[in-house]
Image (cartoon, rainbow, N blue to C red):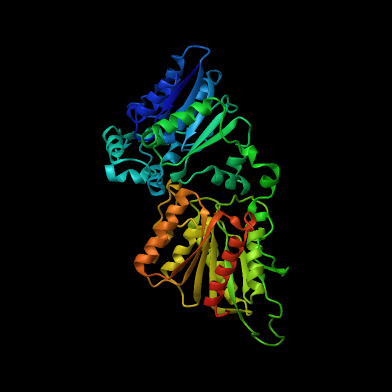
Amino acid sequence: MTEFVLVPGLFTGPDAWRDTAGKLAAEGAKVQVVDLGPARDLEAHIARVVAAIDTIAEGQDVVLVGHDYGAYPAVGAADRRAHRVARIVYLDTGPVQDGAVPLAAVPDQELREVLAEDGDIKGELPVPLREEWRRWGSTAGLSDEALNRLTAHASPQPHGTLLQPLRLTGAGNALPTTGVLCAESGATIDTVRMLLRFGDPTIKALVRPDVTFFELPTGHWPMLSCPDELADVLLRAAADEGTRLEAVGEEEATQPGYLRPFLLDVPEIPRERCGAIDLYVPEGVHVPEGAETGEPRPAIVFVHGGPVAEDARPTPRDWSTLIGYARFAASQGAIGVTLDHRLHAVTAYPTAAEDVAAAVAEVRADPRVDADRIALWFFSGGGPLTAPWLREAPSWLRCLAANYPIMAPLPSWGVNDPRFRPAHEVAHGGTPPFVLIRVGREAPAVATTVAEFVGAAEAGGAPVEVIDVPGAPHAFEGLDHSDCAREAVREAMGRVLGRLGLK
């Protein structure tokens, strides 16, 4: 027999879980929803979850379910009662460790910074207004009735619950865990696998046979948007079902798509490493001895996505995909450029933008480069880095391009920096030409950002050209060598080269 202990997240209480709890009970499981109530700090919330566990008869399998902030008291209670807990379920939130501060559960970077600086443990976050819930997570799937209910039953969140660090003894470290990902929040099993291949140390720690994952096609409050489906997932998690990261397979884990052979046969043009950049120069392009310039060529700078762990090896400029594009560009007469930038976290876009700007300046200073004919080509999580170039496009920037881009910070990132929202820029028009490769097998949250960008471009009359690859996955170049995928890459390169005066 399994008994579920459901721990609510920010602002929410037992009412939000009413339908999911009812479905679990109808399926024969026992259920408790912890009322965290007016307790003022994290330890008090942990004590309430511990008290719920202590009411359960010995021999029952206890499954703790923590939703966003609720993961902290759930994990804290599991540490105190490890011998009673069969599994911890993280619902639309990441794993938490000793010393973690629950403030990380607040999905608003600016608000986190204000609370951390203020340090007022006696205050509280007011209940969001009905139209403000989007600040706290994706509302995808929520009906008007559900939003009304969420608002009506919400309670203020005491600052003390967010500012007190989680203290663990390590007793629960080996407990089985399950992550329930909400796709409309931006997290999918595919994105978790991608982070694993990027070397994310947090994800590496989850490659264990007792760690499983499920994915729901909804937003941040599945207990309201799809309560029955959530109950089914929780029952399956308790039965040790779900996707395991080890199922990625040895070959795929050691050789992810971006390190596999490029989908096009391109010449083996050697690289020239010049500080932060690598150049792939067309044959015969040089500066004659004694001359200040030779025959300058336009350049295409390929900007990787991320976040990529700081210690990931090889670094992005040595990835097969980026090298393939740079060599392809060089084979067509342009100087191809790759670089490494410091997008090591979703909060690092300002630093990465500075790195990209510095690399572009270095490229333009090379005497073999026509400084008045430059294109920038972005990938995946590099999409937000297009915004500064759309906002203040210099005359020498002839074109922007992006492959399967994330065109705005995802809801789960908690990053609201307006400087990195490309849709805001194209909505005003007057931006450089933009070539966008859109894949058919895209994560829903990512596809939403692309749709918003394309819609804003159409409204503003911005010159955005979309090339679709219907059956292709994110980062398809090493995974999909179909004729359709090859033709999309050739077409995109042709359009970019055309803007540079090479076609």
Between residues 159 and 37, which one lies in front from this camera angle? 37
Q: Position of residue 337 (x, y in %)?
A: 62, 68
Between residues 381 and 51, which one lies in front from this camera angle? 381
Which quarter shows the C terminus?
Answer: bottom right
Q: Residue at x 31, y 45 (%)?
A: 132
How many badges with numbers are in the image? 0
- 450 vs 205, left or right, is left
Q: Looking at the image, can residue 427 be seen?
A: no
Q: Position of residue 357 (x, y in %)?
A: 52, 67
Q: Position of residue 62 (x, y in %)?
A: 50, 20
Instruction: Please say if 293 is above or below 129.
Output: below
Instruction: Please say if 353 is above or below 58.
Output: below
- 313 vs 66, left or right, is right
Q: Position of residue 28 (x, y in %)?
A: 45, 18
Q: Residue furthest front?
A: 483
Instruction: Please say if 137 is above or below 80.
Output: below
Q: Quadrant of residue 219?
A: top left
Q: Residue at x 64, y 50 (%)?
A: 311
Q: Looking at the image, can residue 303 be seen?
A: yes
- 351 vs 149, left or right, is right
